Amino acid sequence: MDDTDWIGETFTSTVGWDHLERLVDIGNRMAGSDGERRAAEATRDALAAYARDARLSEFEIQGWERGDSAVHVDGSPVATQAHECIALPRSPSSEVTGELVDVGHGLPEDFEDADCEGQIVLARSDVPDWYDRYIHRREKYYLAVEAGAAGFIYRNHVEGVLPPTGSVGTAETPIGEIPAVGVASETGARLGRRYAGDDVALSVDCETPAATSQNVHAELGPDTDERLLVTSHVDAHDIAEGAMDNGAGTAMVVELARALAGREHELATRVEFVTFGAEEVGLVGSNRLAAHVAPDDVTAVLNLDGVVQGRTLKCFTHGFDALAAAAEDVADRFDHPISLTPEQGPHSDHWPFVRRGVPGYHVTSETGGEGRGWGHTHADTLDKLESRTFREQAVLLTELAVTLADGSVRADRKDPAEIAAALESQDLAEGMRITGDWPFDD
């Protein structure tokens, strides 16, 4: 093969995009569901065409199955339809009543200024432009729990009658402590305008069975103890197709396996492809693998979660200078922008490895919007993505994967204390402690 033939083959390949269509057509890929398993099996089979030892690794999880949810006032429904109000996964099944307290953006100081004891809290999904850090949904939920709230209503900031989803609960206590729903921006505005200070009833009906999920593995390159992990997550929330989050990432892993199979002779270390299960409910699959793999055996993690949403790739490099330099070099060679940020990003499957000091990227994309945009809503559908963008990013990510695996780049591991210090300096530690996600000894 000519040195550049692989570029044309990658840019004209339909393998990854076909797999993306296969995933979204499955429907519900919620962690622990039959759809998630079928998606994992389809991904295993797709990887098996290009890589060796394609297999599933099964594990137990806390299951959660959606029922009906609603907000009522004086016995009359004010938010019931699926396009207005949905339960947040791993909410407990419960019905509670209390005064509606609108805490705005749900900043820590908003909770300090409000009396939430025994009440129903309404919080927006975004943070104001002037605020110095992002506040995750689960942090707002657990601020409400700490404040003694009886229930939690999460209001989308994105217009379009799109209630947001996203899990609650912790690794120690997978089912959350108070019932929680997501409501559309318009529904939340109406609730706040008409009912703030009035008694409202919040109800969540769901089932919480025992369940199983699975990771998908396959390999290329020499059979070395050390390996580069190229990862994504195959599960998605049950309310949409999960095209952006994260069908595109898993389809990209399959495309990279196809492309790297043609460049296998360039690999100096093993490349292990892993598509994780149960990411959306607490990074369960990636935490499981990270606990069973020695950190010294992982040279780097290239985690794809949020690719293809925008045309320009965005890489969180977590302070690993060698990773930033490698991505910058690829961008220069192809005269194609890649956005780089050195900050910590503890919200995807790279994190169980990075927090142990393993060099890792979270690769997403620039969208120009605030927060998740269409993500975690009914609008996460295939029509939002472009095959052109998929192919361009596949070329860049193939080259980056080869660069990480051909022996030319060696990123030094960090002491976990360095990762903890970086989280502290970026004001992320406080929120992680609130949500039970702080993994370091203080």
Image (tube, rainbow, N blue to C red):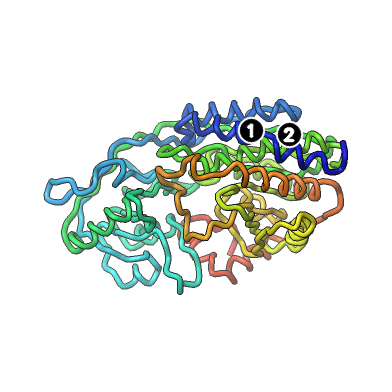
Q: Residue at x 82, y 55 (%)?
A: 410
User: How far separated are the C-alphas under marks 2 and 1?
Assistant: 16 Å
x then y, percent, for residue 236: 49, 39
User: Which residue, given by chain and number where applicable, does mark 1 sit on?
Assistant: 216
Q: Note whether 190 is above or below 283 in the view shown.
A: below
Task: Give the quadrant of the N terminus.
Answer: top right
User: Which residue, given by chain and number where applicable, does mark 2 sit on?
Assistant: 258
Count of numbered labels shown in the rendering: 2
Name the residue nearer the viewer: 204 or 316.
316
x then y, percent, for residue 392: 68, 47
User: For residue 269, what is the image quadrant?
Assistant: top right
The amino acid beneath tag 2 is Arg
Q: Note whether 228 is above or below 324 in the view shown.
A: above
Which element type, helix, strand or loop, lies under badge 2?
A: helix
Q: Note whether 300 is above or below 264 in the view shown.
A: below
x then y, percent, for residue 31: 49, 36
Residue 201 in the figure: left or right of residue 310: left
Query: Considering only order in the chain, which callout, 1 or 2, is on the residue closer to the N terminus?
Result: 1
